[in-house]
Image: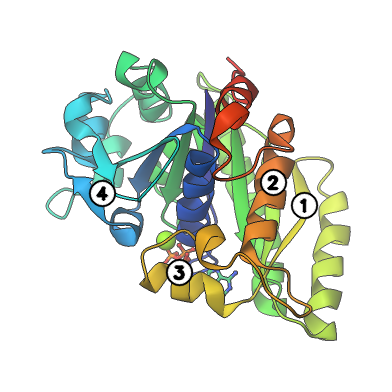
């Protein structure tokens, strides 16, 4: 099973969009995917329609320290070869970051909850969305993952804020790691690249700067363009790779971009396509057996 956390120190960079679309693509490749909406503002919970809403959600997972079926809701997407389920965010009355902060096991509580049999025996991949901040819940999400994905938008301001904020976040998490868990590697993905020289220049600068972070962060080769398709697909509550399959013009279609993204993250999935049920499912599941 692979556990991925989408994190950022900055809001509005595309975390939820990426979590939803990566999850849906992997499920369309035949994987059994569990999304976890760990943002107290429940955007991922509303991204796709639900077929069945469980009686519990994130509050139960954090406070009980276990992920059980009664906290797992089912997403309703037609003709899905795999599975796409979700632990919805449901905590308006209790601040989970504050609650966690008072716990001695706060750093590892979510990581341990993901070892529940209802997760380990039923899913190939867990994708966690988080709030762009620095609370105990965000730390628990990052420390529960095998690796972190951090979208960065290549405008000058967010590029430099990304460098500073990310370094601070990594330092904080690395010190939490000292108390019982280790932090996975971080992969930055340039998101919302506009077709202008300036954004390309900034994207190059971001790559150069990351080289100086001494391997703590690698920048993926896949670049996600700024395209209307991502917003339209969200409005239509459909995965972007299904919505934007072919396009003529310079910007690559979301079907190609999202496949490149998934293949770069999980190289053994290379050659597996969405909707290719026969063969794809077993290759895809094999690909995620990382322990
Ligand atoms: N590649 C893209 N091209 C165009 N628009 C995009 C792209 N990715 C995301 N967006 C849009 O950017 C906005 C912010 O995206 P999203 O909500 O995913 O960010 P977030 O990091 O989860 O924000 P928050 O910090 O509020 O949780 C949304 O309107 C979304 O549709
Ligand atoms: Mg979000």
The secondary element bearing badge 1 is classed as strand
The answer to whether mark 1 and mark 4 are in CB contact below 8 A is no
Q: Is mark 2 within 8 Å of ligand 1?
A: no
Q: Mark 3 points at which residue?
A: 233
Residue at the image point whose x is 44% and y is 35% from the top: 82
Q: Can the viewer see residue 170 in this picture?
A: yes
Q: Which mark is residue 219?
A: 1
Question: Colour mode?
Answer: rainbow
In the rendering, which numbered label is found on residue 89? 4
- Residue situated in front as seen by the camera: 291 or 132: 291
Q: Establish whether ligand 1 lies closer than 8 Å to the Cβ of label 1.
A: no
Q: Quadrant of residue 224?
A: bottom right
Q: Give how far apart the Cα atoms at labels 2 and 4 are.
A: 25 Å
| Pointer 3 or 1: first along the chain | 1
For the residues labelled 1 and 4, the Cα–Cα distance comes to 29 Å
Q: Residue at x 29, y 36 (%)?
A: 100
**Residue at 81 percent of width and 48 percent of height:** 213
Residue position marked by numbered label 2 in the rendering:
187
CA distance separating discs 3 and 1:
26 Å
Secondary structure category for the residue under label 3: helix
Q: Earlier in the sequence, mark 2 or mark 3?
A: 2
Q: Tell whether label 2 touches label 1 (CB within 8 Å).
A: yes
Is 40 situated left or right of 177 in this image?
Answer: left
Badge number at residue 240 = none
Helix, strand or loop under label 4: loop
The span from disc 4 to disc 3 (Cα, nearest Å) is 22 Å
Near mark 3 (Cα within 10 A), the count class, few <14, some 14-19 or many ≥20, is some
Q: What is the x, y in percent for residue 40?
A: 29, 54
Q: Are marks 3 and 1 in contact (CB under 8 Å)?
A: no
In screen coordinates, is 183 left or right of 218? left
In terms of sequence position, does the residue under pointer 1 or pointer 4 come before the other?
4
Going 54% across and 74% down the picture, which residue do you hit? 229
């Amino acid at each position: 099973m692979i556990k991925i956390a989408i994190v950022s120190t900055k809001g509005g960079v595309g975390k939820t969009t990426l979590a939803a679309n990566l999850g849906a693509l992997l499920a369309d490749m035949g994987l059994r995917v569990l999304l976890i909406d760990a943002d107290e503002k429940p955007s991922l919970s509303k991204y796709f329609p639900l077929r069945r809403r469980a009686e519990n959600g994130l509050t139960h997972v954090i406070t009980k320290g276990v992920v059980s079926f009664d906290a797992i809701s089912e997403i309703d997407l037609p003709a899905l070869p795999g599975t796409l389920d979700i632990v919805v965010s449901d905590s308006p009355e209790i601040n989970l970051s504050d609650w966690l902060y008072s716990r001695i096991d706060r750093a590892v509580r979510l990581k341990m909850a993901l070892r529940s049999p209802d997760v380990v025996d039923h899913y190939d991949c867990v994708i966690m969305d988080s709030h762009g901040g620095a609370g105990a819940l965000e730390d628990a999400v990052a420390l529960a993952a095998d690796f972190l994905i951090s979208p960065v938008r290549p405008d000058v301001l967010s590029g430099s804020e990304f460098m500073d904020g990310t370094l601070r976040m990594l330092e904080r998490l690395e010190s939490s790691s000292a108390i019982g868990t280790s932090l996975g590697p971080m992969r930055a993905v340039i998101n919302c690249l506009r077709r202008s020289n300036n954004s390309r220049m900034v994207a190059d600068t971001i790559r150069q700067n990351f080289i100086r972070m001494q391997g703590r962060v690698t920048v993926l080769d896949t670049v996600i363009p700024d395209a209307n398709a991502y917003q339209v697909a969200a409005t239509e509550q459909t995965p972007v790779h299904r919505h934007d399959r072919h396009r003529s013009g310079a910007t690559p279609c979301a079907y190609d971009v999202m496949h490149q993204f998934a293949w770069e993250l999980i190289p053994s999935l290379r050659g597996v396509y969405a909707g290719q049920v026969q063969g794809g499912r077993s290759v895809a599941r094999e690909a995620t057996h990382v322990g």
